[in-house]
Structures are given as structure tokens and as C-alpha cells.
Image (cartoon, grey):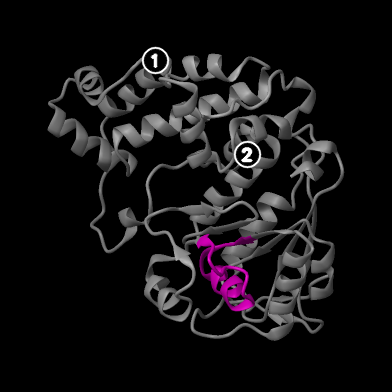
Amino acid sequence: MSGVVSGKAHRVVVLAYDQLWPLEFGIAVEIFGWSRPEILDVGWYDFAVAGPSAPIRSLGGMTLQPDHGYDIAAEADTIIIPAWRDASERPPEDMLDAVRVAAASGARLVAFCTGSFVLAHAGVLSRRRATTHWRNFSLMAQEFPDIQLVDDVLYVDDGDVITSAGSSAAVDCSLHIIRRDYGGEIANRIARSLVTPPHREGGQSQYIEAPYQERAGQSVAGVLDWAREHLHEPIDIADMADVAGMSGRTFLRRFREGTGTTPLKWLRRERVMRAMRLLEKTGIGLSDIADQCGFGSVETFRTAFRDIAGVAPFTYRKRFDPARVSEPEPRIS
């Protein structure tokens, strides 16, 4: 994503279609199409909407006229596809051709919810990791068996292809993209503007035909704050349960109810998030970052960082300030 970091306008193109689902489309417009000059001091994306030449109607009765045709996809650095109107329907060929042209030109492809079916029909998800809304998992697996479907996640970052789950997960996915392009501080500003968490834990399983669960009590919230202050130290479940004043079994249940994940998975991601901020803002070595974030070794740190951020720490740092890189990426023998 050097186009964003270097200052060259990074063009984001959202593909619109007739009978458009307005929520996911609106998320793309709200997050990528508004520069927010009152809170941001960086050059924002060059945003455009592409669609058929004739006016299109969205669900809810609105009529839209995109400013550009699908041919503008060839100029995109990032293509976003909102939820497709019917997972069992093949998208129009001009829309699929736009995706193929963008993919061939090296654009990043992003699909919200059932928008992943558009990518699948275009042939760009073959042998790639991807997700979609949980209700459509069996259909995608049946129609596109060569896709490596990942379940129980809010989004999947497979490098130049990013797919997300249901409607609200489109916000999580978008904030992840901004974090990749601009860093955690800018992503957090956008999240505050949207009045949404900068990162949500858990996956889709917490939304699958499950009864409503109340948020965890203040005792668990206090443990999260405590853990964030002690990320540089070894922390285990027993430590967290002691801080919460609960038995281990009760704490695990309350933690899962409140966050949608396990304490160890939450800790791992929090350590990586802190490492991201250090990589963005400092030039300290990877071994020091590993120590400050509570990883037992650089190797463990690199593995966790790549699993969560999608790239190596060295590569992540270069996106934000190549001049600050003070050492080559360590090799693992």
C-alpha cells in the first residue's frame, strides 16, 4: 500500500449495481469517501463509485446514478464490493469483468458480506482464503469448492484480497484496511468518529442462532484494563482470574460471554496491537518490541504478528516510514 503512505492518492472504487444493498454501500462511502478534515491531518483516499450507465435502484426505493462506469475499475488501487443482492444469482458480466481487470492490474480486492460471491464468480478467489456471511457458507462451499473458506471470523485478510462477514463486520474490515494503510492511530480516530470499537474480538459463531447475552460485568472489564497495563509481563488465565476475583472456570465463561473469544487469544491480539503502534512510531529493534509486548522471543513475536497483521513486522514498519527501519528482518534458521 505504498500509494497511501507515499502521499500519492490511493483510488478506492466501490462497485454499485441495480437493487443495491444500501447499508454496506453506505459503509464504504462513509469510511472511505469522507476525508474528515476536522480529525484527520493526512491525505485521504481518492474515492469513486462505479456502476451501470443507467440509473440504479437500491433496496428501500432510492435511485442512484454512479458518476463512473465499470471501466474505471482499471484505474483503482482498491476495489470494494458491497453485499451482493442474491448469493444464488450470478452477477452481470460487466461487473465481473471490472473485477477481473482490477485484479489483473494489481488492485486490492475487498468484499463485504455476500460481495465475496462476486469475487468468486469472477474467479479471483480460487485457492484463496476467504469468508462470507455464515448463512451462505454451505452455498459457497458447494459452488466454489476450491476456495479456502474460513469460518467464525469477522474478516479474512489474504494480502490483496480481503473478505468480511455480515454487515457490521464491514466496519471491522474497513478499520482493518485503514490500520494497514495509515496505522493504528488513524484507524482509532475513525473508529471514535463512528462511535465504534477500533477492534472487535470474536467471530461469527456469537451471532449464529444464539440467545442474547448481556455484556460481561465490570469485573471482567477491569481485567482487560489491567492486562493492557501488564502486556510486557507473562500473563496466564490464573492471573486474570485472580484479578477478577473469580474461579478459573467462572472467569473463562464470563470472559467468553463478554468478548466472544478466549483470554489467550485476546492477549495475543492485544500484544500484536501494541507492537503495531511501536512499529509505526519508533525505530526500536524487533527484539525490544518483542520484550515490551510480552512475547517470549522474536520468533514467537514474528509468528503472532504475521498471523494477525498478515505481514511480517519488518514489512509492516516499512509501510509507515522506510527511513525509520533500523535493522534487516531477522532470519529464522
Question: Magenta stretch?
Answer: 110-129
Pinpoint residue 302: horizontal percent, then vertical percent: 51, 31
Q: In the orientation shown, which residue stands out farthest toward the front?
A: 333
**Residue 251 position (above or below residue 28):** above
The answer to whether residue 189 shows anywhere in this view is yes
Query: Residue 222 bears which disc, if any?
Result: none
Identify which residue is drawn at 63% across, 24% down. 279
The residue lying toward the viewer, choosing from 54 and 128, is: 128
Taking the magenta stretch, the answer to whether it contains residue 114 is yes
Pinpoint residue 277: horizontal percent, then vertical percent: 59, 25
The answer to whether residue 69 shows anywhere in this view is no
Q: Please, what is the three-letter code of the amino acid marked with disc 1?
A: His
Identify which residue is drawn at 67% across, 81% down. 18
Q: Secondary structure at mark 1?
A: loop
**Residue 159 position (above or below residue 327):** below
Taking the magenta stretch, the answer to whether it contains residue 326 is no
Q: Does residue 128 appear left or right of residue 266 in this picture?
A: right
**Residue 234 position (above or below residue 146):** above
Answer with the quarter of the image where residue 35 lies: top right
Q: Does residue 24 appear left or right of residue 214 in this picture?
A: right
Quadrant in which the N terminus appears:
top right
Q: Please, what is the three-letter code of the amino acid marked with disc 2?
A: Arg
**Residue 3 position (above or below residue 249):** below
Identify which residue is drawn at 52% across, 70% down. 114
- Specify which label sits upstream in the sequence, 2 or 1: 2
The residue lying toward the viewer, choosing from 139 and 125, is: 125
Identify the residue under disc 1: 230
Alpha-carbon span between mark 2 and mark 1: 24 Å
Identify the residue under disc 2: 179
Give the total number of marks visible in the rendering: 2
Q: Does residue 70 appear left or right of residue 144 in this picture?
A: right
